[in-house]
Image: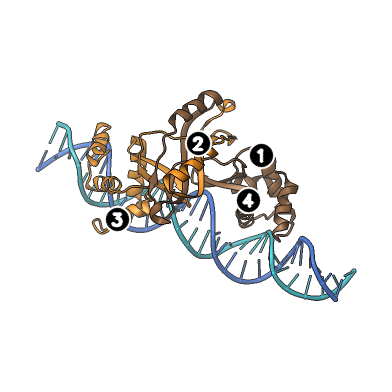
Chain colours: A orange, B brown, C cyan, D blue
DNA sequence: AATTCAAATAGGAATCATTCCGATTTAAAT
DNA sequence: ATTTAAATCGGAATGATTCCTATTTGAATT
C-alpha cells in the first residue's frame, strides 16, 4: 500500500484530503515497523508548528478504522503501522468475560528464532473475540 | 500453580509474607483469565479499607518478575493472569529499532475459530526481541 | 516478650498517554 | 465567492500507572 492508495481509500469513504493527513500517511509508508503518536509528532513538528496530539490521534484512529493502519499496545503506549495483509494468530481472550484459552505454538516459535536470526525476549500471542458463553 | 507454591517462590527470593500479598495471589488463583489492577482492588477493598493502587501495582510487578503472573496490555490497561507454562508465539518486533517481521499463520487461525467455538474479533501476534541488526 | 530494621504499605501527588471540548480554520462542493 | 461540514488547534480533562514520604509491619534476634 502506498500514500496514493491510502488517500483513495479515505476519499472513497468521504473523508477530506488535508496536507497533514497526507504527511502522516507518508511517515508511515516510509517506515518499516511501529510508530507511536509521539513518534509521528516528532517527525512532523518542524513542518507544522502547532500540530496537536488531537490531530495525530484522530487521524491514527481513522486510519485504523478505514483499514490503512493496524494498532497494538506495548510499553504503555499505542503503536501503529501499515496494516499487513496476511492475518496472524494468537491466544484466545474473550472480550466479554476475560476467559482465555491457550494454544501451544512453542515448536513454531523455536523454529522462528532459528530461521530469522531474531533473539526473542518476550511474546504476545492473543486472539480477541467472544467465547461460547458470551456469544 | 497454587497460592502456597507462589508464596514459596516469593519466600525463596527473600520477599516477606503479608496478608495482602496472599490475598492478591488468591484472587488470581481463583480466576481464569486476565484481571486489571482495578479488578483486584475491587475484589479486596471490602477486606482492606485503605488498600492502595501502589500496593496492588507493586505486587503485580513483583509477581511478574518472580514468574508467578504474566502481563499484557490491551484496551489501554495492563492485564495480568497466572503465568502459563506452555510458550506461544507471534510476529517479530525488534525492541531496539521497532522493525517487524511478519509470519503468516492464517490457516492456523481459521482452524482455531472452528474448533474452539470462539468468534474472533481481533488479534495480536507478536514476538519481542532483537533483530539481526540490533544484537 | 521486647527490640530492631529492612521491607511493605497508605495516601496523595506527579506523570504520562490519550481523549475531550469549544472556538477557529479549511477543503471542496456549489 | 459562498457555504457548510469536516478538520484542526490549544488547552483542559481523564484515567492508568508511578513516585514519594511518612508510617507500619514481618520476622529475625536478643
Asked if the residue under mark 4 is in contact with the one under mark 2, i.e. CB atoms within 8 Å, the reply is no
Please give the chain letter of the residue carrying mark 4: B
Q: Secondary structure at mark 3?
A: helix
Whole-percent x, y for residue B99 in the image: 38, 49
Q: Are marks 1 and 3 in one subunit? A: no
* Marks 4 and 3 share the same chain: no
Q: Quadrant of residue A93?
A: top right
Q: Which residue is mark 3?
A: A43
Q: Position of residue A30 (x, y in %)?
A: 27, 48
Q: Which residue is mark 4?
A: B67
Q: Residue at x 41, y 51 (%)?
A: B131
In front: D22, or B58? B58
Q: Position of residue B34 (x, y in %)?
A: 59, 41
Camera-near label (4 vs 1) is 4
Callout 2: few (<14), some (14-19), or many (20+) C-alpha neighbours within 10 Å? many
Same chain for the residues under marks 2 and 3 in the image: yes
Query: Label 2 to label 4, Cα distance in Å?
Result: 21 Å
Marks 1/3: CA–CA distance: 44 Å
Question: Nearest the camera: B76 or A69?
Answer: A69
Residue that badge 1 annotates: B31
Secondary structure beneath dot 1 equals loop
Tell me if A28 is positioned left or right of B28 in this view.
left
Q: Are labels 1 and 2 assigned to the same chain? A: no
Query: Which residue, as the protein is rendered here, is positioned at the far front?
Result: A114
Give the CA distance from mark 4 to mark 3. Answer: 38 Å
Query: Label 2 belongs to which residue?
Result: A90
Rendered location of residue B32, percent (x, y): 64, 37
State the separation of the CA atoms marked 2 and 3: 32 Å
Q: Does B41 sit left or right of A23 as displayed?
A: right
Rendered-image quadrant of the N terminus of chain B:
top right
Q: What residue sits 43% from the left and 31% below the top?
A: B106
Q: CA distance from mark 1 to mark 2?
A: 21 Å
Amino acid at each position: 500500500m502506498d500514500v496514493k492508495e491510502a488517500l483513495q481509500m479515505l476519499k472513497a469513504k468521504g473523508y477530506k484530503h488535508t496536507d497533514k493527513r497526507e504527511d502522516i500517511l507518508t511517515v508511515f509508508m516510509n517506515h518499516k515497523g511501529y510508530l507511536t503518536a509521539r513518534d509521528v509528532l516528532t517527525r512532523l513538528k518542524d513542518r507544522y508548528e502547532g500540530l496537536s496530539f488531537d490531530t495525530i490521534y484522530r487521524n491514527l484512529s481513522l486510519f485504523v478504522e478505514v483499514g490503512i493502519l493496524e494498532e497494538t499496545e506495548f510499553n504503555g503506549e499505542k503503536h501503529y503501522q501499515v496494516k499487513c495483509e496476511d492475518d496472524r494468530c494468537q491466544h484466545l481472550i474473550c472480550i466479554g468475560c476475560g476467559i482465555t484459552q491457550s494454544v501451544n505454538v512453542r515448536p513454531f516459535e523455536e523454529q522462528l528464532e532459528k530461521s530469522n536470526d531474531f533473539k526473542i525476549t518476550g511474546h504476545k500471542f492473543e486472539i480477541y473475540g467472544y467465547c461460547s458463553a458470551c456469544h
